[in-house]
Image (cartoon, grey):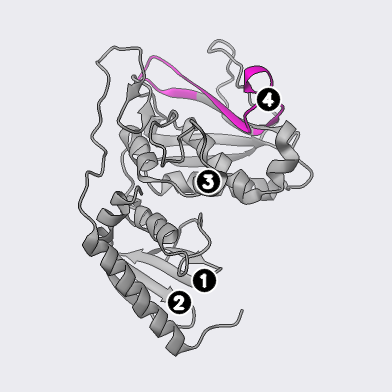
Amino acid sequence: MAHRSWQTCTQTATTVVGLLISHSLLAQPVSEDFSANPTAAGSSEPSVHPRYVVDARQPKWPDGVINYYYNPVNQPAQISTDQMLNLIQTAGRKWENVCNVRFNYLGTQTAEPDVNATFGTIDRINVIGWQALTGNKSGFDGYVAWWYDGVGPNLVDADMVINSDAGERLAGDQKGLGALITHEMGHMLAIKHSDEQTSVMFATPYNTYAFQNTLRGDDAAACASLYGYSSLSSANRVFNWAEQTFPQFFAPTGINSLDLGGYHYRYFPATNSYLAAKDNALIYLPVGGSLTPLGEVEQYLAPAIAAGF
């Protein structure tokens, strides 16, 4: 890949600094947790917040760990198992980056996902796989069913079905398929459809798959209401905001965060640049240029939250 000159990289870095700082100065601080309005204790109605929605009993996975398998039966010919696993693990990582959960992949499995089971027939094996969705589920590209017990209450099973009747279309747009899986993994965490239009978990109507590639603040708040925020949440919410707000510097959107040498970072191949956080410092690096400090991560959290991230 050809690299830009050092002078051009320096000019770009200066522009990035100016734009980011101007946005951080203009933003007004807002509440990070979107002030919840839970339903009364013992109510059977969902706990509806101004934005996100979770079950009134708030079932969740013990220790925030979701052990799951993938069943490749009925997988479209246009996509490989390795490609599917990459999409699934990338989607899971997006949730892990904003709240204290861990999607733990255990391998392939012959057990089939069953979104029509009852509590008495579940196998307590969390499976993601392809099947034809039928009946009132036939119009969906994906569907998740989850069950919880009376202790905790703890989630004990969650299955995801990706509609094989739409397999060719979904496999032909792997970025869109990854966005679908990101939304469905939110359901595997016991997050319901949000009342906030600018969220991945909104469904009336669903946002585009291009939109659903990047989690919003409402999604992070929903997950944190059950599992707590992750230590990397602030950095990732700023990353999400930056890639959506400044595509000329951070493209494409929907890039996952990685870790190396104490840096939590994203590499954006279309713009050949990195955005990283280390010790609460936000850093920009155009490939071929120099590390450019942008200030503290927390400095940019207010504009990120104000913009819905």
What residue did someone put label 4 on? 133
Which comes before the other along the chain, label 3 or label 1?
A: 3
What residue did someone put label 2 on? 286
Which comes before the other along the chain, label 2 or label 1?
A: 1
Start-end of magenta stretch: 129-156
Instruction: Give the Cα distance between marks 4 and 1.
Output: 39 Å
- Percent position (x, y) of residue 1? 61, 79
Which comes before the other along the chain, label 4 or label 1?
A: 4
Instruction: Give the Cα distance between marks 2 and 3.
Output: 26 Å
> Mark 1 falls on what kind of element?
loop
- Give the class, few, some or many, for how many residues have Cα within 10 Å of label 4's Cα (few <14, many ≥20): many
Give the residue displayed 52% in from the left and 71% down from the top. 271
Q: Of residues 251 and 113, which is closer to you in this image?
A: 251
Instruction: Give the Cα distance between marks 3 and 1.
Output: 22 Å
Q: Is residue 79 above or below residue 120?
A: below
- Give the class, few, some or many, for how many residues have Cα within 10 Å of label 3's Cα (few <14, many ≥20): many
**Residue type, mark 4 in image:** Leu
- Percent position (x, y) of residue 218? 36, 40
Q: Of residues 95 and 150, which is closer to you in this image?
A: 95
> Mark 3 falls on what kind of element?
helix
What residue did someone put label 1 on? 271
Left or right: residue 54 versus residue 38 is right
**Residue type, mark 1 in image:** Thr
> Mark 2 falls on what kind of element?
strand
**Residue type, mark 2 in image:** Pro
Q: Is residue 262 visible?
A: no
Which comes before the other along the chain, label 2 or label 3?
A: 3
| Mark 2 touches mark 3? (CB < 8 Å) | no
Foreground: disc 2 or disc 1: 1
| Mark 2 touches mark 1? (CB < 8 Å) | yes
What residue did someone put label 3 on? 91
